[in-house]
Image (cartoon, rainbow, N blue to C red):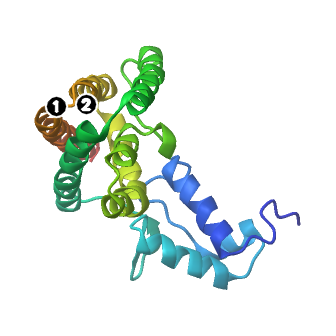
Amino acid sequence: MVFPHAKLNVDGIVNSLRDKILTGTYPPGERLVETDLADEFGVSRGPVRDALKRLAGVGLVTAKNNVGVQVRTFSLADAKAFYQLREALEVQVAQLAAQHAGDAEMARIKYLLHEHEELIHRHPDGAYVQDEKDQDFHLVLVDIASNPLIHKLLADELYPQSVLLRRSHRMVKGRGAKAFFEHQQIAEAIYANDHVLAGMLMTRHIQSSWRSFYSGQQCKSENQSDDR
């Protein structure tokens, strides 16, 4: 038998599984069976078990008795708490970015939004999922804000969960275009170095994102009830 991922260490297994989770290859609720993954990667169950524990530590998988390990699904309570944390941190990020942004930083934002605008034009009713860190509007602002503690929390610890949660917005028609417009508004405030307005607009953006998620989950629940 040929193992395409043969000889991967734990870090390699973590990275591979993380990519598959964040790109939707393994969707929320998908079971991740140690023996199957060990066969896939050509390793024993030990490294797979260690990799799954690390993914659980960053909030991408959960382990439940009599169920096993699954890709994480967000309850409404979990999602609400996550959005509240994002709001608290990202309002500060927007304000700091508006204070620190110079010509080079503004040019970086403008170039990024130009690329995103083309994506929205190609898929006007679709989601606005930015899978790569250097292509993510929020993380670009984190870089510009230049606060290492906030960077560690948002970019290193919360970003994977944020991507996983955003994928739920694929159920909400037109959310991508709306989110892009909100990003443009925040960017305009940053170009003007107006930190008060940038913070206010970021508050509105995160709250709008939460309402979108909530609406999508409600529609999903209603459809599941109809199917039964």
Relative to 118, does residue 175 appear above or below in the rendering? Answer: below
- Residue 49 spot, x, y in % from top left: 58, 81
**Pointer 2 local density, CA inside 10 Å: few below 14, some 14–19, many at least 20:** many
Relative to 132, does residue 18 appear above or below in the rendering? Answer: below
Residue occupying image coordinates x 65% and y 80%: 47
Q: Which mark is residue 159?
A: none
Q: Which mark is residue 194?
A: 1
- Residue 82 spot, x, y in % from top left: 23, 58
Residue occupying image coordinates x 13% and y 36%: 204
Name which quarter of the figure residue 136 lies in.
top left
**Location of mark 2 (residue):** 190
Whether the residues at callouts 2 and 1 have beta carbons within 8 Å, the answer is: yes
| Secondary element at tag 2 | helix
Relative to 59, does residue 208 appear above or below in the rendering? Answer: above
Q: Is residue 48 visible?
A: yes
Three-letter amino acid code of the residue under disc 2? Ile
